[in-house]
Image (spheres, rainbow, N blue to C red):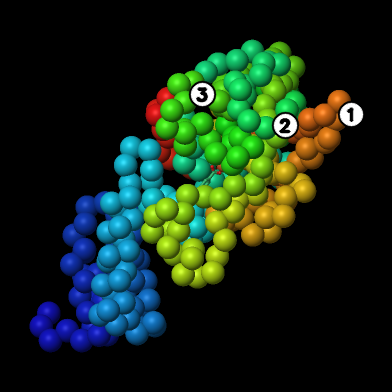
Amino acid sequence: MRNLNQQTITEAVIERFADTPSPRLKKILTCLVQHMHDFAREVELTEDEWMQGIEFLTRTGQKCDGNRQEFILLSDTLGLSMLTVAMNHDKPAGCTEATVFGPFHVECAPHFDNGADIANGAEGEPCAVRGTVRGVDGEPVAGAVLDVWQADATGHYDVQYEALDAPRNRGVLVSDSDGRFSFRTVAAVAYPIPVDGPVGDMLRATGRHPWRPAHLHFMVRADGYETLVTHVFRRDDPYLDSDAVFGVRESLIGEWVPQPGGGYALEFDLVLNPDGKAPLAGNATTRISQKAGA
Ligand code: BEZ
Ligand code: FE
């Protein structure tokens, strides 16, 4: 245990976790140490670089508060969030695929009847959305609870405005007896993720852009089905192949169809995975959500 060198130190650290009561924790820490040490050896990490990394992570933590989660944004932009979603929501063919949750969900959004305008005055061109919630065998899912949220025409979510006293472009709807849902909102546009923190510094230092392609968020819950957290992406968006958080899947691309009288219509069906049919169980809804009105 003395005179450890750059090779033997890894095994010595791993050995220190030998008595970890939880086998899962033991595995995670063992792998973390192994990969972290291998990484440091592979890149020949200097002390200056180690300190820069510590300072970057410190700034990342300092940027976090009740409304801002810079660590999740870092995970999103490094592709770790999407990798975790993909591993934990590997569904049977035909199910709507899952994607990242994002930081702009609000718990306890206002409830609306089908057909309602959820925009509540948000800036943007009108867009009528409708679809059916189905199971993978084609059965309509009545009573599914759909949480929907999206940015306005300036690319901002309601929670990003300091002085808004009521939610905009978000709401909770329930599918009818045929599984159908409908609501009115504004047309989705591309927007940049927040870049006023260390994640923005990382994007600038690496020549990456911060844009997400235009999308509409859904979280769909129904008894007997796996909760679905997803977006529908707009087919004509230039950022579909370079989403800052790697969330685009071909099957999630929908058509915002221009209407003769102005505005758009989007029709998109959401196909749920019956509980227990996922190869690996998981639930993305444990992500930090904001409180309504925050
Ligand atoms: C979003 O789509 O709301 C989002 C997702 C990940 C990072 C930032 C925003
Ligand atoms: Fe979004």
Residue at left offset 33%, top offset 55%? 60
Whether residue 68 is visible to the viewer of this picture, yes or no, is yes
- Please tell me which residue is depicted at 57% across the width and 61% down the height of the picture: 209
Q: Which residue is disc 3 drawn over?
A: 167
Q: Specify the quadrant of the image occupied by residue 17.
A: bottom left
Q: Which quadrant of the render holds ligand 2?
A: top right
How crowded pointer 1 is (Cα within 10 Å; few <14, some 14-19, many 20+) is rated as few
- Residue occupying the point 45% across, 21% down: 165
Provide residue 94's location: percent of width, then percent of height.
73, 41
What residue do we see at 34% from left, 85% from top? Answer: 44
Residue 192 percent across, percent down from the top left? 56, 50
The label shown at residue 260 is 1
Q: CA distance from mark 1 to mark 3?
A: 29 Å
- Crowding at label 2, few (<14), some or many (≥20) Cα neighbours within 10 Å? some
Q: Is residue 25 left or right of residue 76?
A: left
Q: Point out which mark residue 1 bears.
A: none
Q: Residue 114: which quarter of the image? A: top right
Image location of residue 184, percent across then percent down:
70, 23
Q: Is residue 271 above or below residue 63?
A: above
Whichever of labels 1 and 3 marks the residue nearer the N terminus, that label is 3
The residue that mark 2 highlights is 125
- Secondary structure at badge 2 equals loop
Determine whether 171 is above or below 36 in the image.
above
